Image: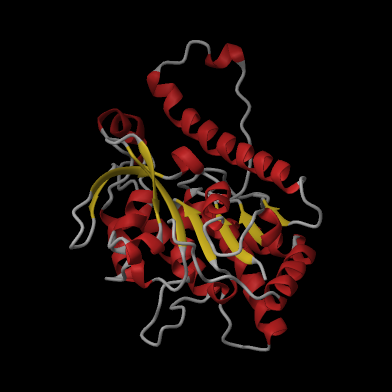
Amino acid sequence: MAIRILSIDGGGIRGILPGEILVSLEDKLKVKSGNSDARIGDFFDLIAGSSTGAILGAAYICPNKEGRPKFSAQEAVDIYLKEGGKVFDTGIWPYLDKWRLLRGEKYSTHELEKVLKKHFGKTKLSKLLKPTCFVSYDIKKREQIIFRQHCAIVKNEDFLVRDLLRGSTAAPTYFEPARIYSLPPANKKYILVDGGMVASDPALCAYSEAIKFSDVGGIKDMIIVSLGTGKQLISYKYKEVKDWGIFNWARPSIDIALNGGAQLTHYYLKQISSTVENTKYYRIQPNLYDASPAMDNASPKNLIKLKNSGEMNARYFDKELDEIATILTSTQGFHKYQHNP
């Protein structure tokens, strides 16, 4: 037995990349399990996600009326392909971006909230099909907020999924912070920004959460599948940045925080994995190929490029995905927490 963990990074519209990779993995799971209705959520015991990774993760374990996963892997990535252009729409005056950023966030939250409501409706955190580790950050309390299905059930700290996803995706300068409230009887309020600000790769958070499952003694009892959203590190020269002010540093700071945090998480998990033989930690960081590295480039042309890049990555990582599918279908997972949540 091993606890099977799926972790997905933040990265805005680049969520299409891990989404397409998981389409390929789901196809392999169908073949290897002999179940044509198999879903990604069937083969993982804990789902972790930051920002766009939280949206994908929630989609894989959102229940339908029959208590089965509502979305296939393809249907999950189709949300991005069909709705991305609406969410990341600057309106009729895109050339005023700099002026808009001086006065407020780049995008209205209206379309994002509309899309989340459309696809997740009134689904509660407590009703998701598997335990979760969805990351956000409270700027008033100044602490990380991890939305855990277990706490929603045991501690009555429940939330609408669409609300917690709004908080996890509130990237500074892109969307305004999210003010969300817990469902009765709890009375909690959070002022949230994007989970990627503290954990763009939430795999280490998932590792810490997995320890709370019964009979899990460490990474030797885990299968971790961690997916990035494409890495294209931008190099900044001293002469270029030494006189930058607040405005010029805004976007680069987010880029550095997101990529640097993910690099550090991968480093830590590799070090932890090295202490035990035959560990099952898979880190897949897709290549962007010719797609834009921007988190918000949802132009029709770039959506096609992201989809194509995702499919190319699925072929490139085919051997790893085949190995993962074999392990997932041949391993019995854990389903119970210990008593100390």
Q: Residue at x 47, y 70 (%)?
A: 130
Report the quarter where the N terminus lies: bottom right
Query: As rendered, which of 194 and 125 lies closer to the eye?
Result: 125
Residue 217 image offset from top left, x and y in percent: 64, 56
Asked whether residue 299 is in view, the answer is no
In the image, farthest residue toward the front: 339
Residue 92 in view: yes
Which of 264 and 258 lies nearest the eye of the viewer?
264
Residue 134 lies in what quarter of the image?
bottom left
Residue 200 at x, y percent in the picture: 52, 44
**Up-down relation of residue 295 to residue 117 (above or below):** above
Q: Position of residue 256 (x, y in %)?
A: 54, 31
Q: Is residue 11 left or right of residue 119?
A: right
Q: Nearer the viewer, residue 66 or 170?
A: 66
Residue at the spot x=21%, y=62% of the render? 183
Residue 181 in which image quadrant: bottom left
Left or right of 73, for residue 308: right
In the displayed structure image, the side of residue 63 where residue 280 appears, left or right: right
Colour convention: secondary structure
Quick check: 91 above or below 71?
above
Q: Please name the residue shown 58% across and 61% down the image.
A: 6
Figure label count:
0
Residue at 18% from the left image edge and 54% from the top image edge: 187
Q: Quadrant of the C terminus?
A: bottom left
